[in-house]
Image (tube, helix red, strand yellow):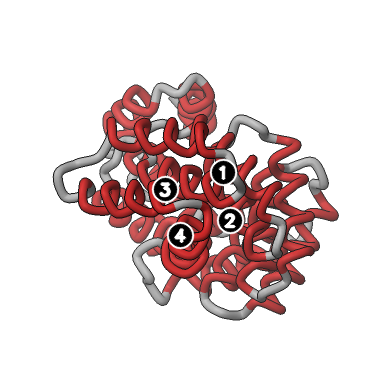
Amino acid sequence: MTVTELLERVHSLAEEGDWEGAAELLREQLADFDSEPALHCWLGVAERELGLDGVAYERFKRALALDPEDPHVLATAGNGIAAFDDPDAERALRVAAVTAPRLPLARMLYGAYLSREGFVEQAIQELTAAVELEAEDAEILYELGVARALGGEWDLAADALADAVRLDPENGWSRIVFGLVLWEGDRGEEGSGELLEGARLRPDDLDAQLAAALALAATGREDGAYEMLERGRLHATEVDLALVTDVEERLDSGPEAALAFFSDTLAPELLRSRLQERP
C-alpha cells in the first residue's frame, strides 16, 4: 500500500465516521511510514475524535517535527497543538496561511487562532479572506462571527453567525453562541429562540438548557422555561444540582429575577467560555 492509497482509505473511513477504524489502520501502517507527516497528523485527528486528546497532541507534535510542507498538515497539526496553548502553533498556522493563501482551511484556522489570542483585527482579515474563498462554509462563517464577537462588534457577529446557522441549522453549538450574541446585542426575543433551538439540539448540554430556561422566562415564556429546566435537571450531576436549584429559584421569582441572573451572571460567562473554544 502506498502513502496515497493509505490516506485515501483513511479519508474514506473518516467520512463514514469510523474513527476507530481509521486510527487502527494508521497505527498498523505507521512503522512503514514513520517519516510521513501526514500519517502522524491524521492519526492525531482520529485519536482526538476518539477522546484521546493527550495522545493526539503528541501525534501532531511529531507531524510538525518532520517539517511538513503540505499546508493541510501544517494547518491541521498547528490547530491541534493550539488547543494545548503550545507556542509552536502560531508558526505552523502562519506558514500554512502564507504559503497557501487560497486554501480556506489554512486561512480559517489561522484566523481562529489569532482571534482567541487577542489579535482580533488580524483575525478578521484572515477570516474574511477565507469567506471570500468559500462563502458557503458554515464553519468559516462561525469563526468570523466569533472574531467579531470577541471584538465587541455584536451586530456584525450576529450577521456572520446567522449565515452559519442558515447553512448548518442542526449545529446546536452555533445556535447557542448565536443566541448569546443576540442577547449581547439587545435582541433578547430573537436570542431566546436561538437558545431554545440550540438546547434542543444538545440535550446533554446542561448549561444550554439552563440558559434557554432563563432566557425564555426573561421574555415571558414561562412554560418553555420550566420545560428546559427539567430537561437540564435530567442531565445534572450531583455537583450541578446547586446551579439547577439556583436557576429554579430565579424562575419562581419571575421574569425580572430570571433576566438579572441570566444577563449578569450566566450569559456573560457562558459566552466567554464558548467563544474561547477552538475549532
In contact (CB < 8 Å): disc 3 and disc 4: yes
Q: Residue at x 57, y 43 (%)?
A: 195
Q: Disc 1 and disc 3: Cα gap in Å?
A: 16 Å
Question: N-terminal of the two: label 1 or label 4?
Answer: 1
Q: Which disc, if any, is residue 180?
A: 2
Q: Residue at x 55, y 44 (%)?
A: 216
Question: N-terminal of the two: label 4 or label 2?
Answer: 2
Q: Which disc, if any, is residue 195?
A: 1
Q: Disc 2 and disc 1: Cα gap in Å?
A: 7 Å
- The residue that disc 3 covers is 251
Query: What is the crowding at mark 2: few (fewer than 14 residues within 10 Å), some, or many (at least 20)?
Result: many
Q: In this view of the protein, can residue 32 be seen by the observer?
A: no
Query: What is the crowding at mark 1: few (fewer than 14 residues within 10 Å), some, or many (at least 20)?
Result: many
Q: Amino acid at mark 2?
A: Leu
Q: Amino acid at mark 1?
A: Leu
Q: In this view of the protein, can residue 55 be seen by the observer?
A: yes
